[in-house]
Image (cartoon, helix red, strand yellow):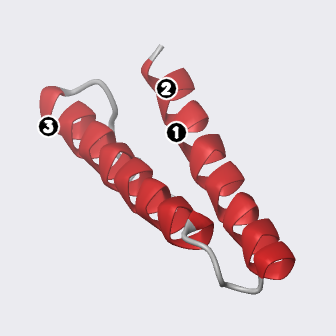
C-alpha cells in the first residue's frame, strides 16, 4: 500500500511537470498557470519526500545496502 502511494505521488509530480511545460509553450508564460503548476509540483514533491522519510523512520520501507 505504501509503495503504491509513493508511485502515485511520483506520477502526479510527472503529470504536473508536463502540464507546466504545456502551459509554458501554449501561453508563453503570460498566465499564472505555469506558476500554479510549479507550486503544485513543489507541494507534491515535499509530500513524497515526507512519505518516504516517515516510512523509513517507522520501518515500512528498508534500505538495501548491497547493490
Q: Which mark is residue 57?
A: 3
Q: Secondary structure at mark 3?
A: helix
* Label 1 close to label 2 by CB (< 8 Å): yes
Whole-percent x, y for residue 53 in the image: 23, 45
The Cα atoms of the two marked residues, 2 and 3, are separated by: 16 Å
Q: Quick one: label 1, few (<14), some, or many (20+) residues within 10 Å?
A: some
Placement of 23 over or under 3, stated as above or below:
below
In the rendering, at what x and y percent does residue 52 appear? 32, 42
Towards the viewer: 12 or 2: 12
Residue 46 as seen in the image, left or right of residue 35: left
Asked where in the image residue 60 lies, by quadrant, the reply is top left
Residue hosting label 1: 9
Q: CA distance from mark 3 to mark 1?
A: 19 Å
Cα separation between marks 1 and 2:
6 Å
Q: Could you say where residue 24 lies in the image, as x and y percent from the top left?
A: 74, 78
Q: Percent x, y for residue 30?
A: 65, 83
Q: Earlier in the sequence, mark 2 or mark 3?
A: 2
* Residue that lies at the very extreme toward the left in this rendered image: 57
- Observer able to see residue 66: no
Q: Residue at x 75, y 69 (%)?
A: 23
Nearer to us: label 3 or label 1: 1
Q: Residue at x 70, y 50 (%)?
A: 15
Give whichever of 4, 21 is nearer the camera.
21
Figure check: 28 above or below 9: below
User: Mark 2 = which residue?
Assistant: 5
Q: Is residue 62 left or right of residue 26?
A: left
- Identify the secondary structure beneath mark 1: helix
Do we see residue 54 in this rendering?
yes
Residue at x 73%, y 59% (from the top left corner): 19
Q: Secondary structure at mark 2?
A: helix
| Total numbered labels placed on residues in the image | 3
Vertical relation: 57 (above or below) 18: above
Amino acid at each position: 500500500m505504501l509503495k503504491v502511494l509513493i508511485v502515485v505521488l511520483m506520477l502526479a509530480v510527472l503529470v504536473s511537470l508536463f502540464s507546466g511545460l504545456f502551459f509554458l509553450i501554449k501561453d508563453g508564460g503570460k498566465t499564472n498557470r505555469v506558476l500554479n503548476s510549479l507550486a503544485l509540483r513543489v507541494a507534491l514533491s515535499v509530500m513524497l519526500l515526507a512519505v518516504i522519510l516517515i516510512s523509513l523512520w517507522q520501518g515500512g520501507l528498508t534500505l538495501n545496502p548491497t547493490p
